[in-house]
Amino acid sequence: MTKVSAEQLGSEPIGTLLVKQAVPASIGILVMSLNILVDSIFVGNWIGAIAIAAINVVLPVSFFIGALGMAIGIGGSSIISRALGANNHKKAVQTFGNQITLTFFITVSMALLGLYYVDELIPAFGGKGAIFEPAKVYYIIVLYGIPFLAFSMMGNTVIRAEGKPKFAMIAMIIPSIANLVFDYVFIYIFDWGMHGAAWATTAGYIFCFLYITYFFISKNSELRLTWSSLVPDPMIIKEIGSLGVVTLARQATTSIVYLLMNNILFGFGGEPLVAVYGIIGRMQMFALFPVFGVTQGFLPIAGFNYGAKKYQRVRESINTAIRYASLLAALVFIFLMVFPQEIASMFLSDRPDQSAESLAANSFVLENITLAMRLVFGATPIIALQLIGAAYFQAIGKAIPALLLTLTRQGFFFIPLILILPLYLDELGVWLSFLFADVLATVVTGIYLRREIKSTLVIQ
């Protein structure tokens, strides 16, 4: 594997550099998303549609704790990228050490709290009726592996900040492959049901953690940890926190959205309607992988060049990232609009020995998925501006605008819409909320980003 130095972030042509950064990120996200997708297909076919709903209930809690690691990772990686751009290697190492300390204490504590309040959290997130028991089984086992996931998510962003996207890609591929292999063994061969699905997921987290640990103790990393770098530095922790809260707020609002969606949909259509959202949620993670890949590739480029005061390159990276991501989003949009039922059918079992309840749930999902998916993904061609705009402020260390723009879609628009529209439009109002929130958030982000570029990225 070719070794890439951080300095190349400030010298190579932006288009070439973005492809080098975004393609590995996209592949990693693709494999990770395929893992979630195929995992759901396995669960749906080998256990049942209710099992998909059960996993959908657990995801917001487990992902929120895992996202603590990502928040610490992205917050610290913004500092690391800018420090490397300014040739301040000491600060980069100190930041990384503080990231490790924070991740350990915060995520382990949160995982223990999550296990203690398991019986209260699962019903609160929509795990009611037939969903409760399988959700509890999955939740408890997966939470054992959440600290490993948090460390992996933190470490992955640091690897990318060092300008080594191929290693970050491998780190994302390893748990995905491990999960799918163990899914087959634990669910299909051993017939462990939800226990098997949960242990397969946890095993994937552990394998990822081991690889990332190997990266940082080998000669591949430019960040050589010392014991003193692990000692918390109040100023660095404050900066990590101010930037990381953007990612944490995004995941917190995502968890709130899951809570509201699962409960609202359960009220309209019971477990099968929650399963419809479960499938759409998997597609949201999978289908937009190229857009997320461009966003991930954009972050270290913008951060490094901003730290080096190369503002023309920062401007170029913004424009190039938006163009690339918009083209990819348009292709995704066409696919989702044309094949909604075919996509849904992959998640549903066609075994003749299914119970009447499972057959009825499958039929309900197929009848309701088309309109729901088309409305949820209706604004896909324009979301690149929303994602790149919010990521830019995070990359350059401007925490408040990054936080506000991150919260715009789900916090300021979607949550109020999801509480209001269903009162008048029932289930249709639920799906329309996604479309309206995306359009409004994109408009706001575009206006704010344009103003910021004109006032800050002034070319001398």
Image (cartoon, rainbow, N blue to C red):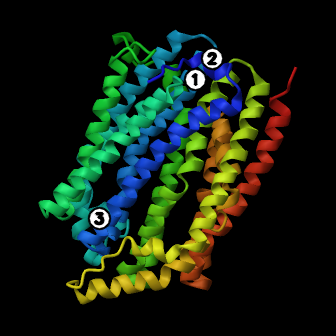
Instruction: Please name the residue that numbered disc 1 is placed on.
Output: 81
Numbered circle sitting on residue 42: 3
**Quarter that holds the C terminus:** top right
Depth-wise, is mark 3 or mark 2 nearer the camera? 3
Residue at the image point whose x is 50% and y is 31% from the top: 165
Q: Secondary structure at mark 3?
A: helix
- Residue type at mark 3? Phe
x and y percentages locating residue 84 in the rendered image: 58, 16
Q: Nearer the viewer, residue 353 or 252?
A: 353
Can I make out residue 451 in this image? yes
- Residue type at mark 2? Gly
Q: Nearer the viewer, residue 107 or 16?
A: 16
Q: Secondary structure at mark 2?
A: helix
Callout 2–callout 1 Cβ contact below 8 Å: yes
x and y percentages locating residue 65 in the rendered image: 37, 46
Residue at the image point whose x is 42% and y is 18% from the top: 221
Residue at mark 3 to residue at mark 2: CA–CA distance: 45 Å
